[in-house]
Amino acid sequence: EPEVTQTPSHQVTQMGQEVILRCVPISNHLYFYWYRQILGQKVEFLVSFYNNEISEKSEIFDDQFSVERPDGSNFTLKIRSTKLEDSAMYFCASSQIRSPRTAGELFFGEGSRLTVL
Amino acid sequence: GENVEQHPSTLSVQEGDSAVIKCTYSDSASNYFPWYKQELGKRPQLIIDIRSNVGEKKDQRIAVTLNKTAKHFSLHITETQPEDSAVYFCAASMGYSTLTFGKGTMLLVSP
């Protein structure tokens, strides 16, 4: 069964450093997402991406964050200058179907745990 | 934007009992309501979903009901087993928009 894969599984970084989290969505999916989950809290939407551009973003996704699809398979999340409060599990997700009336099932990756010291 | 409330935050049951988790949503335009199960340290995985054109959906021991008028939906697990222990998240979405998750319910099933 195809899966969303993410790397690294865990990254520890110093405050102020740049971090890039990588994701390989399921190959025939068209919509890509980043969500984050602070320990013990709910999953929060960061950004969605379709047709090589951001389609929606949340208040959390400020100028420190950026996403990119550098090639036909990878989808990356960059945090330019990490803060302590960026420590969380970051989930990439992808979906195939989306229309004005039909949301599609999201398939999540295993997550990348970011620890900012 | 959409707001999803979920309760209870923790639910403890004995093996074999039923478990019910309830969610409410705020945006009447939402039309897709999935439930995700997240085991400790793992990714959220879809267990069942319902769209606004149906009121109930069942898959073996799991069922979801939707009341569009009241804007609430519920997850029902019958004959619970220890392996059902996990955090369950409800979510709501409408068409182009992304999922808004509830805060989660930690279900503990004791043998």
Image (spheres, coloured by chain):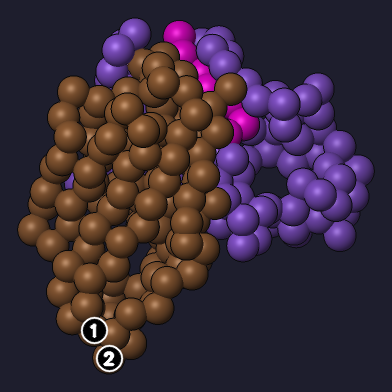
Chain colours: A purple, B brown
What residue is shown at x 66% (from left), y 54% (from top)?
A: A38
Magenta-drawn stretch contains A46: yes
Determine which quarter of the picture holds residue B83. Answer: bottom left
Chain under numbered label 2:
B
Q: In this rendered view, identify the residue nearer to me: B55 or A39.
A: B55
Q: In this rendered view, identify the residue nearer to me: A22 or A97.
A: A97
Q: Which stretch is magenta?
A: A45-51
- Tag 2 near tag 1, CB within 8 Å: yes
Q: In this view, does A10 lie above or below A36?
A: below
Q: Is residue A40 left or right of residue B40?
A: right
Q: In this rendered view, identify the residue nearer to me: A72 or B11.
A: B11
Q: Reading the chain from its start, which is encountered first: label 2 or label 1?
A: 1
User: Which residue position holds label 1?
Assistant: B15
Q: Is residue A19 above or below residue A110?
A: above
> Dot 1, how many residues are within 10 Å of its Cα: few (below 14), some (14-19), or many (20+)?
some
Q: In this rendered view, identify the residue nearer to me: B31 or A76.
A: B31
User: Amino acid type of disc 2?
Assistant: Pro
Q: In this view, does B48 lie to the left or right of A38?
A: left
Q: In this view, does A70 lie to the left or right of A1?
A: right
Residue A81 coordinates in the image, percent (x, y): 86, 37
Numbered mark located on residue B111 in the image? 2
Determine which quarter of the picture holds residue B95. Answer: top left
What residue is shown at x 23% (from left), y 71% (from top)?
A: B18
